[in-house]
Amino acid sequence: MAKTCSKILAIAAAAMTVLASCSKGSIQPKEGEETNTPEVKVGDYYGFAQFSVPAATKTVFVEYTGSDKAGKVIEVPVKPVVAAPQDGKDPEPFGLVELLIKANVPTKVSVYSTANQRSEKIYSISNLPIEQTSLAQASSSAQKLELAEPAPYVTTAQDQTFYHSSGTVMFDDSWPVLPEVRNGTIDSDYNDVVLDYDIEARTVSNSVLESDGWREQIRAVLHVRAVGGSNPRRAGLVLEGLDKKYIENIEHYVTLDSYDNPHGDLPKWVNSNIGKNSFYNVSTALRPFMEIININYLNQAVAGSKSGEYTYTNNGKSHKTVFNPGRGYWNAPDQSQFQAGIAPYSGRYYNTTPGYVNVAGGLITYTVIFNIKSRANMTAEDSEKCLKNIIDAVNNTANQNFYIITSTALPICVKGYKPLDKDNSRYTQGYNSNKNNLDEEISYYGKDGSIWAFKVPTLTRHAWEKYAFDLAYPKFANYISTKGEEDVDWYLYPDEKYVTCWW
């Protein structure tokens, strides 16, 4: 594998988590604001942490600053609780962990896990305050943890807590045709669209709600990692559980990599065909959603003209590149990207064809920020309901409904998830065309067990073009057939021959 492949950390779901935790200090109080600086007293203080991690996680790490100003890390063995699936869905690849954390002074902690293919730190909570004097908020099932000599802190306008869930969604675009049978060929690589995502809720302590309630928000980020087919046109996310009544206003941005730290300007053709047409909607009669338009443009042969070129900044250096090196005049495959015996597919789709992955070149990124109404203007009961709703938008991963739309306007979702159209007309059209092979009760599920999309934890590589996903991940089939009871860590054991290089 090329050195650039081993260096690249631009998988944006992980990058957004790290960037978010690094950028918190950049949020400054408004001019004229006062900070709340209560007297620090020694006693018993508690914080209740409920957060989402990959279901295969066996250990989480609690970070805090000690009284000696040195960073401390506590390893905590955990067994994430995966909610019983509803509506025919498969078990989520994520589960909830609950910690009841005790300290002798008010302090704060962050929690991360490393159950991914690169063993990277993926933060679930950043800057959780340990400041309560009672246990009322904690559940009886929470694991108990006591911090040794933490450093005290005082509440300021920058005292915000961040909840994260991040992962990857992989799609096959053949629905309602069974993935294994399409035009007489095997096509179950699940790389027709690959999305990385990060969903973050930013909350503030009740003690600063009056002055800083305006800071609360949900930030949803989608990154187009790969488009391994000509059929997909759009890709998006529906936040099923997010109550629209709590949303004050919305911001949205299309960038190259993170909105906080873009690595170059989008070429004009991308901005005009993808950037300006991507959108969000919260006023619809359905539910809040965000969508990236015209993702098929990433597969078009535009590299031969200047419109497809762009400059990407990596490690402080500028590089000229194109989104899809397999198109136009960039024809020589990089053989360091793949192992012997893997033949580059002539279709040369975006980031799925061996030798033509745009390593370190940046990903199209769509960021939608749902700014939350100030809870300072709500009753205490409504304030707590609002807070729970925005945290659940992150932690309840079963309410995160990812989808693609094909060239024939058919929506494709993960098994058991709601079709997108209000009256189900598009779904019904697709279902009726192959109903003898499709389950009557469970959406996007074949009678033979076929599925067309699934979620996986962050930093899970996708399969090379035209190689079955079961070859890339030999334990995946058993995980699905046992409904998540076995091989929950299947994604940690890829066959390196069949999975893509780092992008």
Image (spheres, rainbow, N blue to C red):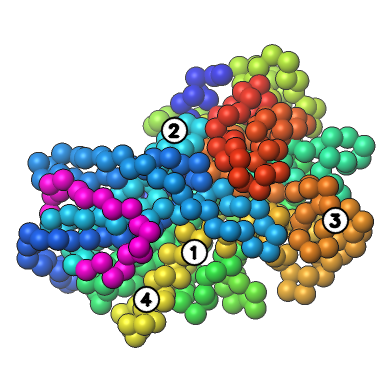
> Mark number for residue 438?
3
Q: Which residue in the structure is indicated by mark 1?
A: 393
- Secondary structure of the residue carrying numbered label 2: loop
- From the top left corner, tell me how far across and down residue 227 is, in percent: 69, 42
Disc with the residue nearer the chain's start (4 vs 1): 4
For disc 3, the neighbor class at 10 Å (few under 14, some 14 to 19, many from 20) is many
Residue occupying the point 12% across, 42% down: 69
Q: Amino acid at mark 4?
A: Glu
Q: Which residue in the structure is indicated by mark 2?
A: 119
Q: Amino acid at mark 2?
A: Ser
- From the top left corner, tell me how far across and down residue 368 is, in percent: 51, 61
Q: Which residue in the structure is indicated by mark 4?
A: 384
User: Magenta region: which residues?
Assistant: 134-153
- Secondary structure of the residue carrying numbered label 1: helix
Mark 3 or mark 2: which is in front?
3
- Secondary structure of the residue carrying numbered label 4: helix
Magenta stretch, overall SS: loop
